[in-house]
Amino acid sequence: MSATPPLLARRFWREPTSLLPLRWGSYRGRYLGGLLFIIAGYVLLDGSNTYTVPFLLLGTVLNVTGWLVLPAVGARRLAIVGPALVFQWILLTGPQSVVVMVVPFLGWLLVRQRPALSYLSALLVVAVGIACANVFTTSQGEAASYGITAASVVAAAWLGRWIATRRPPVVIRPRTEKRPTPAG
């Protein structure tokens, strides 16, 4: 009866990225800053055209900066920068391409370290993107199409988080033995 009962690592679910040791900044500051930069990048891109090239450049820089600032494992952040940038620029073709917003959303799930089951929430973004592409066929519907699809991305992100919180808490068992040290 010398065994200690397992300890609950966390009684309530916490964001996996909030548990990472950060080299600079606070979790909340980097999360909000990164999210703000990503959103601002997409908004500037939506408001740009061939006559407003500085908006294209600034939107691109803000988007990349946002992904790099988010608190996450470095490899996950770097993995999404390229695809997010490519698909951000594909959105310039008009409302028929809003379904590609699923790629940055999948990157969001990757960066936020969501479990595999939460990736099903991407189906919401795909469905809304296809519907918007069929309803808004001219450039006059571009803002509405982007807005509706962006709202579906936000809803899907919350759905993905809800799915992630349904996992059982992690149980940490106390170590009974010490690890062997390497000979040397």
Image: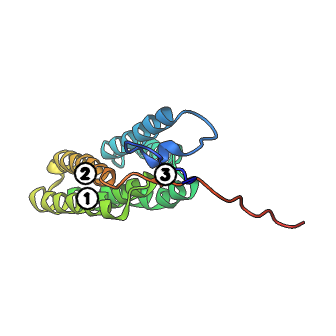
| In the depicted structure, whether residue 60 falls above or below residue 86 | above
Q: Classify the position of the C terminus by image quarter.
A: bottom right
Query: If you read the primary sequence from the N terminus, does the residue marked by circle 3 or circle 2 appear first?
Result: 3
The residue tagged 3 is 6
Real-space Cα separation, disc 1 to disc 2, in angstroms = 6 Å
Residue located at (58% from left, 52% from top): 2
Q: Position of residue 88 (x, y in %)?
A: 37, 55
Per the image, the residue denoted by label 2 is 159
Considering every residue shown, the one lying at the far bottom of the view is 183
In the displayed image of the protein, which residue is found farthest to the front? Answer: 1
Per the rendering, the mark at residue 121 is 1
Residue 31 in sight in this render: yes
Q: Give the mark nearest the N terminus, 3 or 1.
A: 3
Amino acid type of the residue that numbered disc 2 sits on in the rendered structure: Leu
Task: From the viewer's perspective, tell me whether residue 147 is left or right of residue 110.
Answer: left
Q: Is residue 2 above or below residue 54?
A: below
Vertical side of 10 occupied by 179: above or below:
below
The amino acid on which the numbered mark 3 sits, given as a three-letter code, is: Pro
Answer yes or no: do the residues labelled 3 and 2 have beta carbons within 8 Å? no
- Across and down, in percent, residue 181 comes to 80, 62
Query: x, y (%) of residue 11?
Result: 39, 42
- The crowding category of the residue bearing disc 1, from other C-alpha atoms within 10 Å (few below 14, some 14 to 19, many at least 20), is many
SS at mark 2 in the image: helix
Location of residue 176 (image quadrant): bottom right
Do tag 1 and tag 2 residues touch (Cβ < 8 Å)? yes
Disc 3 versus disc 2: distance between alpha carbons? 31 Å
Q: Nearer the viewer, mark 3 or mark 2?
A: 3
Q: Earlier in the sequence, mark 1 or mark 2?
A: 1
* Mark 3 vs mark 1, CA separation in Å: 33 Å
